[in-house]
Amino acid sequence: MIPSERAHLLLAAHTHPGMSGKDNEDRYGISAFFASEQQKIPVVLAVMADGIGGHKAGEIAAELAVETISEVVASGDVSQPVDLLIQAIVQAGQSISEKAEVDIAYRGMGSTCACALVVGSRLYIASVGDSRIYLIRGNKIQQLTTDHTWIQEAIDHGAIKPGQAHNHPNAHVIRRYLGSRQEVVPDTRLRLNPAESDGQAVSNQGLYLHPGDLIFLCSDGLTDLVNNTEILTAFKGQGDQAVLESLVELANQRGGHDNITVLSMRLPVQARGNRWASFRDWLKSRRRLALACGVVFALLIIGALAAGGYYWLSNRADRQIMPTSTTFARQLTPAIGGTTMPGAAPDVFSSTQSLPGDVEDGSAVPAATQPTSVVSTPMSVTLTPWPTNTLEP
């Protein structure tokens, strides 16, 4: 990737050693890039690390974690963001383990880590340990990462209830961290709902961020003393940097027994003129979905045109199939007493009909019921049906 002097996100950070008097073993790093020379997609990486170990060993481990992860991501291919984060975290764990083997003073050191990678407007995360990543959107806060602690495992298995976790004696027992003897397994679940399965959480990677969304990273020195609701409330009505400082101060007021580090990244609310560019990037990132929608829309248009064409042809055929008469039968109107009865229905006869005096069933037709005149007149031209061209009697 190509380093960038400015990030496309609004960034803020603050760290404090706490009130216990120990050294600050927390470390963090923020880096800004462009995806490549050809693709000027802005990228921001944020790394949070909380060191574990003896005298100064924890801060060495945390510093190694931040430096290694940042370097690997900077030299990697952002086209596969999750794979890139996994590679960076695994390599960081190896670097810490190798450093601990070389110097006996660093034996047993380790570090947690929480990584947030924003590519354009899409979020990718990975974590090891109990440093957390939150999403604050509107009036809601959601913890995206899952703690790798004894407490969390006990809650997941139903051994204890969430309300029993705060003062539990195993509250700070970490089950997964960089530098452990076991191979590092980065957690790539991005949990948007506590009821989600692990597979659903992993599929949330690449979460599209809305303008105004805030990504919040912190070490457990904050979350041990400040709950999620208080974090959400703090971000209302203040600038992000001021909020971070107020959160650290609140934790210190409540004891500050550990190092406290907080970091925020906010996607700015764009001007109206830039919203189309953001929407266009979103469509590009989901080009397969857009292509599928286009195909479905085209099929619907073709179906509508076909149905309309069939309807038009059917109506046209019905209009063309009309009876054509080449023989005109003169209209006869029965007369009673020499007066034509108004409204009498016309009787149309062909030239084969009986004349007065003919016998059809062996008896003569009464004269009173016989028509006065029947004339069949062949015509040499085709005329429209009665009454338009009715000849006068």
Image (tube, rainbow, N blue to C red):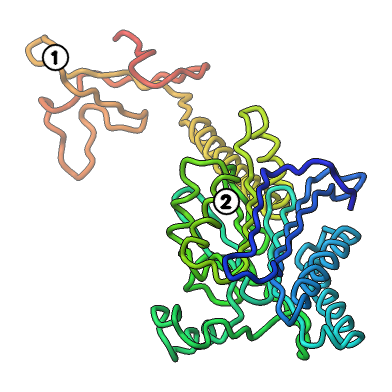
Residue 44 as seen in the image, left or right of residue 22: right
At 81% from the left and 73% from the top, the residue drawn is: 60
Mark 1 residue element = loop
Count of marks placed on residues: 2
Q: Is the C terminus in the top left, top right, bottom left or bottom right quadrant? A: top left
Q: Are dots 1 and 2 in contact, CB under 8 Å?
A: no
Q: Which residue is mark 2?
A: 245
Tag 2: Cα neighbours inside 10 Å, few (<14), some, or many (≥20)?
A: some
Q: Which residue is mark 1?
A: 342
Q: Is residue 152 above or below residue 1?
A: below
Mark 1 or 2, closer to the camera: 2
On the question of residue 308 being in view, the answer is yes
- Residue at left offset 54%, top offset 76%: 197
Residue pictured at 49% horizontal, 68% vertical: 255
- Residue 147 in picture, x, y percent from top left: 58, 76
Q: Residue 281 placed where, x, y %?
A: 72, 44
Q: Amino acid at mark 2?
A: Glu
Outermost residue, front direction? 21
User: Disc 1 marks which amino acid?
Assistant: Pro
Disc 1 and disc 2: Cα gap in Å? 104 Å
Mark 2 element type: helix
Report the side of 165 relative to 346 (left or right).
right
> Which sits in the foreground, 356 or 128?
128
Residue sitting at x 85%, y 50%:
35
Q: Earlier in the sequence, mark 1 or mark 2?
A: 2
Which percent across, then down, holds residue 26? 70, 67
Q: Quadrant of residue 229?
A: bottom left
